[in-house]
Image (cartoon, rainbow, N blue to C red):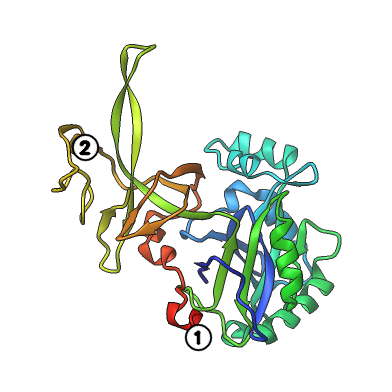
């Protein structure tokens, strides 16, 4: 279930509001003695968070599917940097970090149990009470926690104003819809800044005056369209940098392509015409996201009809 970025918190009886946690989204399932942790990109996260697997196997319920967020506590909040450190290729390092910086799993949806295998097909208004009952029976005193939720618009506004410590905004979900797997119709995210996940499709060199040699001067960001073509947004299969433009220079046409494997989150203030209209700022690497998830769809904003404002 994906989230659409919007500028303001939606209001109405059909909405439920939750904190937007600064972690790794994760579907966690248990089937008897088998536990699976799956990222949004479909990657297996179990090997990086063995402590979650161990605790999941100790829960009273032996068959369930949860949707939630993996976070790493730090001080009075959560640290995304510490979370990134947990993605390490060496098993010995993973084991050491699982003891030094153990993760928490914040559950915010319940998709299936041994008794209700098709819970995902029910509206959130029914899934949330089921999740709360599940949490009460299984999650008390463990590193699995219930993520809070409210239907109060005023509370959501307050949370957005006070975000920090591991929460960087508000998530709004439609309580009248079933789990919207693979689309953005049932969930919206509101941050105090706009951000987008982009593929690094290439880079341009710059010359370092101090070193007297070439260094990476800028990254070329790409987004996929509905046909699966990767377009240059600030080897692209769609529109590429250095195309025909009255602003093009010899330098703008020189760039080094990269395989579309790396994903980065950037902040921006304006996007139109399939381009970031001003400079973007790097926020963080996103190893938990698949390049194909970096689409123009995430940047579509709900636009208010200006004529309605004039009435």
Residue 279 lies, in percent from the top left, at 40, 43
Q: Nearer the viewer, residue 57 or 98?
A: 98
Count neighbours of disc 1 (C-alpha within 10 A) and say few if under 14, some if 14 to 19, many if 20 or more: few
Of the two numbered discs 1 and 2 on the same chain, state the one appearing first in sequence: 2
Separation (CA) of disc 1 from disc 2: 46 Å
> Outermost residue toward the right?
141
- State how many labels appear: 2
Q: Is residue 59 above or below residue 247?
A: below
Could one spot residue 68 in this view of the protein?
Answer: no
Count neighbours of disc 2 (C-alpha within 10 A) and say few if under 14, some if 14 to 19, many if 20 or more: few
Residue position marked by numbered label 1 in the rendering: 311
Residue at (21, 37) in percent of width and height: 252
Residue 232 lies, in percent from the top left, at 27, 51
Residue at (47, 76) in percent of width and height: 304
Residue 75 lies, in percent from the top left, at 79, 41
Q: Secondary structure at mark 1?
A: loop
Q: Secondary structure at mark 2?
A: helix
Residue at (46, 55) in percent of width and height: 196
Q: Is residue 78 above or below residue 270?
A: above
Residue at (64, 79) in percent of width and height: 11
Residue position marked by numbered label 2 in the rendering: 252
């Amino acid at each position: 279930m994906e989230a659409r970025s919007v500028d303001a918190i939606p209001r109405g009886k059909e909405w439920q509001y939750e904190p937007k946690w600064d972690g790794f989204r994760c579907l966690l399932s248990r089937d008897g003695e088998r536990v699976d942790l799956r990222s949004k990109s479909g990657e297996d996260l179990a090997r990086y968070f063995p402590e979650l697997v161990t605790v999941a196997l100790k829960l009273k319920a032996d068959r369930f599917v949860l949707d939630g967020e993996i976070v790493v506590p730090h001080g009075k909040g959560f640290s995304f940097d510490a979370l990134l450190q947990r993605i390490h290729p060496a098993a010995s390092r993973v084991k050491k970090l699982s003891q030094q910086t153990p993760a928490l799993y914040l559950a915010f949806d319940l998709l299936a149990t041994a008794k209700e295998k098709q819970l995902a097909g029910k509206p959130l208004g029914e899934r949330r009470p089921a999740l709360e009952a599940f949490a009460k029976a299984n999650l008390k005193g463990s590193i699995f926690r219930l993520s809070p939720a409210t239907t109060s618009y005023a509370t959501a506004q307050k949370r957005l104003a006070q975000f920090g410590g591991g929460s960087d905004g508000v998530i709004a979900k439609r309580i009248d819809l079933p789990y919207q797997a693979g689309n953005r119709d049932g969930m919206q995210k509101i941050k105090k800044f706009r951000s987008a996940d982009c593929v690094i499709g290439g880079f341009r060199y710059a010359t370092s005056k101090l070193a007297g040699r070439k260094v990476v001067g800028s990254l070329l960001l790409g987004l996929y369209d509905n046909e699966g073509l990767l377009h240059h947004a600030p080897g692209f299969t769609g529109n590429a940098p250095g195309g025909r433009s009255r602003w093009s220079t010899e330098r703008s046409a020189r760039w080094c392509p990269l395989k579309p494997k790396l994903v980065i989150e950037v902040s921006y203030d304006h996007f139109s015409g399939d381009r970031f209209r001003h400079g973007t700022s790097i926020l963080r690497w996103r190893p938990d996201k698949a390049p194909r998830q970096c689409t123009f769809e995430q940047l579509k904003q709900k636009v208010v009809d200006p004529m309605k404002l004039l009435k």
